[in-house]
Image (cartoon, rainbow, N blue to C red):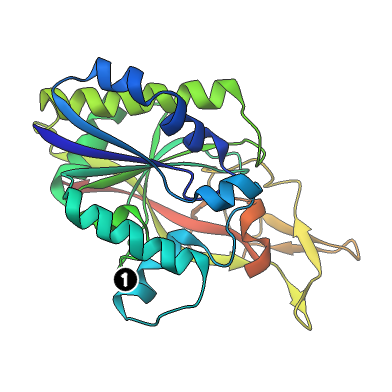
């Protein structure tokens, strides 16, 4: 019997995953009797406070934990607890549920080059052609889901933080059920190729003395996965002047104007579409 750990609320203000793992666990266990399903609210304190995190991002602490940096933070200690629980459970799969304020649509995120997650993502994409696959290499295993080699993140947007948007929740549940069906029936191993949007570069807001001096340009706002070409406007300065895309290669932006990334001044990431063998 395959063990699957489904995680929500890794970020406490992303309510879709938090409510899915707390309100729909028993229903999903009944639907998938061939799986040993465990549901986990990852960051209960941040969820209670309706904050992304209390002290630091829980979805980034597992690299510091591996280095024994011993951060004196709530999330670091919670990460140690979670890692111990994962080691005891020894799941075959981890599926982590996320939402974004950007106009990302429905996506699955791959964090490594393991064949099974790529095949599983390819099988879901085969049935849902509007769903996109992001490849976000996690070399340091900083993500919660990366604590298991077979993992996927579901990431859907746009949705504001700290609310339940019914269409987003139901869409997430639908994709989760398709993933669990494929795992339960082992019906995905025949797929040998997958199209991904591979992250290649982060783009930051223009700054002066550490302060943001421009916003995303209306031209690209809400245009995640729309190809950017040289000299397309990407930022609009508060002085009215535009800043233009200067990369030689045309690439696809994702997580445009994501609310959670403002503290790091990250405006969006650039991806390259490519096919990968699996």
* Residue shown at the point (45%, 31%) measured from the top left: 22
Q: Is residue 248 visible?
A: no
Mark 1, residue position: 140
Q: Position of residue 164 (x, y in %)?
A: 61, 29
* Residue shown at the point (89%, 61%) measured from the top left: 240
Split into 4 quadrants, where in the image is the N terminus? top left
Using residue 157 as the reference point, say whether residue 118 is left or right of it: left
Q: In front here: 109 or 43? A: 43
Using residue 122 as the reference point, say whether residue 164 is left or right of it: right
Crowding at mark 1 (Cα within 10 Å: few <14, some 14-19, many 20+)? few
Q: Which quadrant of the figure has residue 96? A: top left
Split into 4 quadrants, where in the image is the C terminus? top left
How many circles with numbers are drawn on the protein?
1
Using residue 70 as the reference point, say whether residue 124 is left or right of it: left
Asked if residue 21 is positioned above or below residue 12 in the image, the reply reads above
Q: Position of residue 225 (x, y in %)?
A: 51, 43
Q: In front here: 144 or 232? A: 144
Using residue 209 as the reference point, say whether residue 141 is left or right of it: left
Q: Position of residue 224 (x, y in %)?
A: 56, 43
Q: In front here: 206 or 247? A: 206
* Residue shown at the point (50%, 58%) measured from the top left: 270
Q: Of all residues shown, which one is farthest toward the right?
A: 239
Q: Secondary structure at mark 1?
A: loop
Q: Is residue 100 visible?
A: yes
Asked if residue 80 is positioned above or below residue 130 in the image, the reply reads below
Q: Which quadrant of the figure has residue 168? A: top right
* Residue shown at the point (67%, 38%) measured from the top left: 160
Q: Position of residue 193 (x, y in %)?
A: 18, 40
């Amino acid at each position: 019997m395959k063990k699957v750990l489904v995680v929500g609320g890794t970020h406490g203000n992303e309510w879709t995953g938090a409510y899915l793992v707390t309100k729909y666990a028993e229903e999903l266990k009944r639907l998938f009797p061939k799986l040993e399903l465990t549901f986990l609210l990852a960051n209960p304190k941040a969820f209670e406070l309706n904050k992304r995190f209390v002290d630091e991002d829980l979805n980034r602490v597992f690299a510091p934990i591996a280095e024994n940096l011993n951060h004196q933070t709530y999330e670091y200690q919670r990460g140690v607890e979670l890692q111990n629980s994962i080691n005891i459970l020894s799941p075959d799969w981890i599926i982590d549920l996320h939402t974004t304020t950007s106009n990302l649509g429905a996506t699955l995120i791959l964090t490594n080059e393991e064949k099974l997650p790529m095949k599983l993502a390819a099988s879901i994409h085969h049935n849902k052609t509007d769903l996109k696959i992001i490849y976000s290499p996690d070399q340091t295993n900083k993500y919660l889901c990366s604590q298991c080699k077979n993992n996927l993140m579901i990431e859907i947007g746009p949705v504001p933080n700290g609310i339940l948007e019914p269409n987003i929740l139901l869409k997430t549940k639908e994709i989760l059920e398709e993933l669990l069906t494929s795992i339960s029936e082992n019906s995905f191993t025949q797929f040998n190729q997958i199209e991904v949007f591979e992250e290649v570069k982060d783009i930051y807001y223009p700054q002066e003395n550490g302060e943001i001096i421009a916003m995303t340009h209306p031209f690209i706002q809400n245009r995640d996965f729309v190809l950017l070409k040289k000299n397309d406007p990407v930022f609009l300065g508060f002085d009215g002047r535009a800043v233009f895309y200067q990369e030689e290669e045309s690439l696809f932006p994702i997580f445009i104007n994501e609310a959670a990334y403002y503290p790091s001044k990250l405006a969006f990431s650039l991806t390259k579409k490519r096919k990968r063998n699996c």
